[in-house]
């Protein structure tokens, strides 16, 4: 069974890699087709998109909401096509191409030098799939791929999980740098003396399952606070990363400090600052 699954993964991976060799401008054209399929044709999660936008921005007219929704589908298609394009490009090439630049990299690097380990919080904004190249994009970084660890949620499908792992570790970023969120606290404690930069995409969660509640885009929102709990337990500094999309395939990664010692903060304080930063970015 595992052999057949691996073969199926490669049957999908090989044409994806070949598609990746196409120029970025071709991927932009393909993204418009993907956006058209996801939106007007398949209407992928369209009721959810319109409902959430209407709740978050009640002052906007229907036509304004419709325009944002259209832009959302193009942005999602861009993410898919940019991720495919980046598979066969080195992070250095992506940086030279001007796809990603960094602001505040000195602050994150300084935290790493002074404290040895840093917890970094970010949301699903910009193109977070390009973030593993941060050690290259930030020319001042004294941390490398071996120092970077990302939390992720394992998929229920073994096929999807294997495909996900192979895509994520296509470059210098190794599978060992991807740690399931359920075992992240244990991992952080076991590697307490190591120099690490821990990345968490901290999302809101379904009602009744979050540990921290904030006002987010005018709505009561619950958040997973696992990253905050790890930072407070280990006394690590915490930083926030925002990814601004300036144009198609033009992103700026912003690094901002949240606190120097998470142990000195109150429960929920770090998550509150994170949600506020994310709301401002949106």
Image: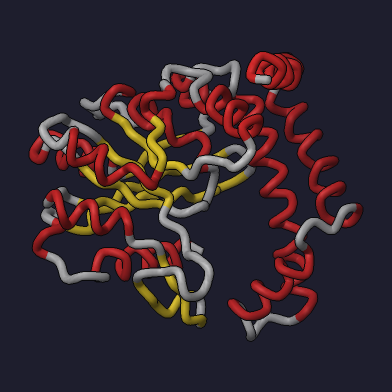
Which residue is at the far bottom? 59
Q: In the image, residue 268 lies at what x, y percent?
A: 26, 70
Q: In the image, residue 63 lies at what x, y percent?
A: 79, 75
Q: In the image, residue 277 lies at what x, y percent?
A: 37, 64
**Depth check: 269 or 21 in front?**
269
Relative to 70, is 149 above or below? above
Q: In the image, residue 269 lies at what x, y percent?
A: 24, 70
Which residue is at the far front? 1
Relative to 129, is 214 above or below? below
Locate residue 250 relative to residue 210 in the image: left or right. right
Hey, which quadrant is residue 104 in on the image?
A: top left
Report the number of discs: 0
**Depth check: 129 or 212 in front?**
212
In percent of the image, x 12 and y 51: which residue is there?
235
In percent of the image, x 39 and y 45: which residue is there?
181
Is residue 17 visible in this depiction of the protein?
A: no
Locate residue 185 relative to residue 79 in the image: left or right. left
Is residue 142 visible in this depiction of the protein?
A: yes
Locate residue 102 relative to residue 188 in the image: left or right. right
């Amino acid at each position: 069974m595992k052999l057949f699954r691996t073969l199926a993964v490669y049957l999908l991976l090989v044409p994806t890699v070949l598609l990746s060799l196409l120029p970025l401008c071709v991927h932009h054209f393909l993204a418009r087709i993907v956006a058209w399929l996801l939106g007007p044709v398949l209407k992928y999660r369209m009721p959810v998109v319109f409902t959430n936008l209407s709740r978050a921005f009640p002052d906007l007219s229907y036509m304004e909401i419709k325009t944002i929704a259209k832009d959302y589908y193009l942005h999602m298609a861009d993410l898919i096509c940019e991720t495919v394009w980046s598979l066969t490009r080195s992070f250095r090439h992506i940086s030279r191409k001007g796809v990603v630049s960094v602001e505040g990299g000195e602050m994150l690097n300084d935290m790493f030098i002074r404290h040895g380990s840093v917890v970094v919080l970010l949301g699903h904004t910009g193109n977070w799939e390009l973030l593993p190249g941060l050690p290259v994009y930030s020319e001042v970084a004294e941390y490398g791929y071996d120092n970077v660890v990302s939390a992720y949620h394992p998929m229920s499908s073994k096929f999807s999980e294997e495909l996900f792992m192979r895509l994520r570790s296509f470059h210098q970023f190794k599978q060992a740098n991807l740690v399931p969120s359920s075992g992240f606290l244990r991992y952080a404690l076991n590697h307490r003396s190591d120099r690490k930069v821990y990345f968490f995409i901290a999302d809101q969660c379904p009602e009744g399952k979050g540990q921290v509640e904030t006002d987010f885009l005018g709505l009561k929102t619950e958040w997973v606070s696992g990253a905050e709990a790890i930072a407070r337990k280990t006394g690590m500094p915490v930083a926030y990363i925002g990814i601004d999309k300036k144009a198609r395939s033009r992103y700026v990664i912003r690094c901002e400090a949240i606190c120097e010692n998470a142990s000195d903060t109150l429960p929920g304080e770090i998550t509150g600052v994170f949600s506020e930063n994310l709301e401002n970015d949106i």
